[in-house]
Image (cartoon, rainbow, N blue to C red):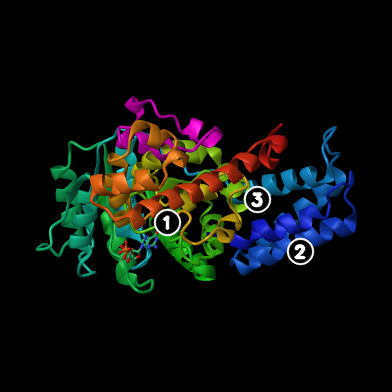
Amino acid sequence: MVLDNLGSSLRGSLDKLSGKSRVSEDDIEEIVKEIQRSLLQADVDVSLVMELSDSIKTRALEEEPPGGTTARDHVLSIVYEELVDLVGESTDIPLENQTILLAGLQGSGKTTTAAKMAWWFSKKGLRPAVIQTDTFRPGAYDQAKEMCSRAEVDFYGNPDNDDPVDIARKGLEETADADIHIVDTAGRHALEDDLIAEIEEIEAEVDPDRNLLVLDAAIGQGAKDQAKQFDKSIGINGVVITKLDGTAKGGGALTAVNETDSSIAFLGSGETVQDVERFEPNSFISRLLGMGDLGQLTERVQRAMEETQEEEEDWDPEDMLKGQFTLKDMRHQMNAMNKMGPLDQVMDMIPGMGGGLMDELPDDAMDVTKDRMRAFEVIMDSMTESELENPRSIGASQIRRISRGSGKDEERIRELLQQHKMMSQTLKQFQGMGQGGDMERMMK
Ligand code: GDP
């Protein structure tokens, strides 16, 4: 994730403020240096970094901390606010009829983003359609079609037509029933005149409400030129940053936002259609600083629950986070996991769980692969209600019985119990850490 190490290095220097009621100039110098180092490493534009560090310095030294606030919390809240300010507001994307045009270089993630955004809109109750006008990249048509079918959204493309403007026109006609039209365009390896000419023609044909520039998070300072060019030719309203799941830096994308005077619309963090979220500055920065983001987590849990139709079974994720973690919880968790994304990603959103804690857990603590999940499902079906509620009661004789009933090795059943134990311990750590965290204090 962008600026990944900012959270931990910053926490380190903030911890040195513990117990102090005032910040000295030296303290703030050190903190600002940490922030500068991380931002520059993440490819954020130097002038932006300087602007940010000046404001942090001035504010931390001049502003009076609100009564009862420690120096640490005071500085943390300033850093937080300034970073939120740096990334800016999210691009306005109303949930209503509109046409969105995607621009960007080849490989930036446009086609994937088109399907992801369509999926996102469909989850908001709208009817999106993706129109694929990329006649340049072989395979773009098949890829888009396949992803749209996975996202269960309408799709239009025509591999036999090599005129993108014509495809766009027909696409809009053919998908007239949809309320959201997402028009994917071709990219090139580099900015070339014919790419710009083509996208200008498509733009003139479809008359989009929004033009979004899709940028690979790894792009670095090259983002600046691209952003300028696209902005000049079609006007850019917002940016989508993709591949935030990689070792990406993301700072270049921030520069592009600044350059086009636009904002960030969506974030992509994986190859499947569900790996997308609306950019939300507060939650983005909280996660960056390892402060967690319960808002996002709740949204994901709810969405997963709706999809797995678990809600009628009287299962409340809050209970799981608060109290005993039973095998039933584990089963719900496993069912929901595919929909929510890997649990370690989800854990990143929980206060106190991000920023390296996951690294300290055994590698497989949260890793329940699909095969294991299936085996675990079968095993759990052979357990009694009271065993599911109270897995500690399961001894050797029960394991033998469950093994016979499920047709699974006893070893597998022990593995399941072991997995449950690990997940349970992890959640216990969270229960201890999640309450009264930095964010809650800060937001008061
Ligand atoms: P396009 O040429 O701009 O349409 O780019 P594609 O949508 O084909 O994406 C290029 C490659 O990046 C593909 O292999 C995608 O699977 C991959 N990709 C796109 N978005 C993401 C993302 O958010 N995370 C990861 N890991 N891969 C992505």
User: Marks 2/3: CA distance?
Assistant: 15 Å
Closer to the camera in the image, 354 or 21:
354
Precedes in sequence: disc 1 or disc 2: 2
Residue at screen point 69% across, 67% down: 37
Name which of mark 2 and mark 3 comes first in the sequence. 2
- Left or right? Give the position of 289 relative to 334: right
State which region is magenta.
Answer: 301-328
Query: Crowding near pointer 2: few (<14 within 10 Å), some, many (20+)?
Result: some
Q: Nearer the viewer, residue 398 or 191?
A: 398
Q: Is residue 230 magenta?
A: no
Pick the front one: 281 or 20: 20
- Name the residue that disc number 1 marks: 367
What is the crowding at mark 1: few (fewer than 14 residues within 10 Å), some, or many (at least 20)? Answer: some
Cβ–Cβ under 8 Å for marks 2 and 3: no
Quadrant for ligand 1 reads bottom left
- Which quadrant of the rendered structure holds the C terminus? top right
Q: Which residue is mark 2?
A: 33
In the image, 429 versus 264, the foreground residue is 429
Q: Are marks 3 and 1 in contact (CB under 8 Å)?
A: no
